[in-house]
Amino acid sequence: MGLAHANITLENPKLPKLKPLQVKALADSGAVYLCVPEQVAEQLKLEPLYQREVILADGRKQICPYVGPVHVRFDKRGCMVGAVVMGDEVLLGAIPMEDMDLVVLPQARKVTINPENPNFAAGAAKGFRHPRQ
């Protein structure tokens, strides 16, 4: 199994005249946040909102700026999230992938719209118990 990437568009909804960025993002369902390099945050003129402590893959903890809002688009889907400023590439974590109802296809090494919900994003808004249980 290799790495999966997604072509996404990032926009600053507070500055609609600012040109959106088309980027190739590493999809990581084990990560939580959208992560962007400092130069992406600067290009989109994203405002610092908070500091976040993140745990890196090697177990180290790091304090990073949290910026936003960011409008993320993939195909016909979109969401609004904040982003952690870190690293040297855009990383698409679980929050934006869940919000847009995207899935990772490991064998194809790609991200796609959830085939169970092809027309619109779906997800649980509260604890869900299937009627047959």
Image (spheres, rainbow, N blue to C red):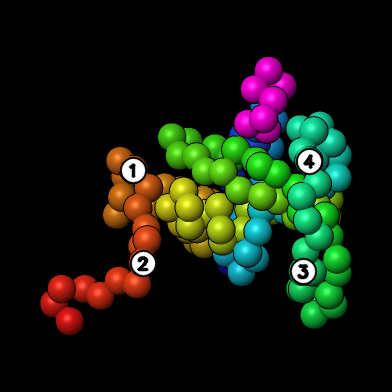
Of the two numbered discs 4 and 3 on the same chain, state the one appearing first in sequence. 4
* Three-letter code for the amino acid on which mark 2 is drawn: Lys
Is the Cβ of the residue at disc 1 closer than 8 Å to that at disc 3? no
Q: Position of residue 2 (x, y in %)?
A: 62, 62
Is the Cβ of the residue at disc 4 closer than 8 Å to that at disc 2? no
Q: Which residue position holds label 1?
A: 120
Q: Which residue position holds label 4?
A: 47
Asked if residue 94 lies in the magenta stretch, the reply is no
Of the two numbered discs 1 and 4 on the same chain, state the one appearing first in sequence. 4
In whole angstroms, how far apart are the C-alphas of marks 4 and 3? 19 Å
Looking at the rendered structure, the secondary structure element under dot 4 is strand
> Which of the 4 image quadrants contains residue 28?
bottom right
Q: Position of residue 128 (x, y in %)?
A: 30, 71
In whole angstroms, how far apart are the C-alphas of marks 3 and 2? 26 Å
Looking at the rendered structure, the secondary structure element under dot 1 is loop
| Residue at the left extreme, as displayed | 132
Residue 126 badge? 2
**Front-most of residues 93 and 131:** 131
Of the two numbered discs 4 and 2 on the same chain, state the one appearing first in sequence. 4
In whole angstroms, how far apart are the C-alphas of marks 4 and 2? 30 Å
Callout 1 crowding tier (Cα within 10 Å): few <14, some 14–19, many ≥20 = few
Mark 1 vs mark 4, foreground winner is: 4
Q: Position of residue 32 (x, y in %)?
A: 63, 64
Residue 54 badge? 3
Callout 2 crowding tier (Cα within 10 Å): few <14, some 14–19, many ≥20 = few
> Which of the 4 image quadrants contains residue 109?
bottom right
Q: Is residue 99 above or below residue 15?
A: below
In this picture, residue 49 sits left or right of residue 98: right
